[in-house]
Image (spheres, rainbow, N blue to C red):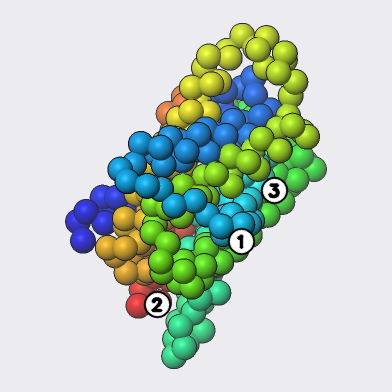
Amino acid sequence: MLTGILAGLAAGALWGLVFVAPDLAPGLTAVDLAAGRFACYGLAALLAMGLARGPQRWPTSRQLGAALGLSLLGFSGYYLLLVLAIRDAGVEVPTLVIGTIPVWVMLLGKPQGLLWRKLLPGLLLTVAGVVLMAGAQPHGGEHLMPAGAVYWRGIGFAVLAMLSWTAFAVWNAAWLKRHPDVSVTEWTNWLGIGAGLAAVALWAVLGSESKVLLALDGRANAAMVCIATGVGSTWLATVLWSVASRRLSASLCGQLIVSETLFALLYAFVVQGHWPQPMQVLASGVFVVGIVASIRAHR
């Protein structure tokens, strides 16, 4: 159990890095950042398959199609929406919106016999935490909390990102249950191939021209951010989360997802050079209590 908990927390810490990636690579557009991250994930998956001992099984056309579709929901499409949300609404509120994913997954997968009224307190607390965070006034100016239509557009992107990853979590779990012959490592690498192909297509259609990227002053730093988020925050984080999912109950795994939100907020405050206001601390506390209440009700 300890190994599973540590793996889940480590996955959350790696996932949290993606929320500050736009600040660390300001020269990249949202499309370039998403494409770069998942292209690196695809390369990492191919490298892992090449270095693995013994012959590697490649996916069939149907398996590759499933990997492409799910990788779009859970990786390329989701992260593009998240980057757009952070661009328009700052880090804090999108972080909190994304942090409600465990609740929605729990509601969609509610076991028979569990009363809906037991889930209501946790859901209300989570919504209250998001509202408190949205009402906070962070230091740092318009970059952190834009006003008007741009801000609410960012909130819309955050909600779409949340829906995208929620759908991925539910359908991905169902796919794995229907295909017990596919190992977790194989599926992680196949998802990486799908994400890499989608990333190349995304960049070819909507990405910046190669000459523009090569002319960036911070191109080396931008490349490092893509590699770190692609290899660390995606491939390695997926492996770690698979370890946690195998060793722990679904309820405990759901609670550990909170670590992504907490680490993301911590990284944002460190990178942007300020500490949270009291309302932000209160919002984070209410948010965590809401998730824990939902997990307890699920048990």
Relative image position of residue 137 (x, y in whole percent): 59, 39
Mark 2 Cα shell of 10 Å, populated few (<14), some (14-19), many (≥20):
some
User: Within the image, what quadrant is residue 297 found in?
Assistant: bottom left
- Residue located 62% across and 52% down the image: 68
Say what amino acid the circle numbered 2 marks: Ala
Front one among 54 and 129: 54
- Tell me if I can see residue 280 in this picture: no
User: What is the spatial separation of the Cα atoms under label 1 and label 2, in whole angstroms?
Assistant: 38 Å
Relative image position of residue 138 (x, y in whole percent): 56, 36
- Residue located 32% across and 46% down the image: 54
**In front: mark 3 or mark 1?**
1
- Residue located 61% across and 57% down the image: 61
- Residue located 56% across and 26% down the image: 23
Mark linked to residue 279: none
The residue that disc 1 covers is: 62
Mark 3 Cα shell of 10 Å, populated few (<14), some (14-19), many (≥20):
many
The residue that disc 3 covers is: 157
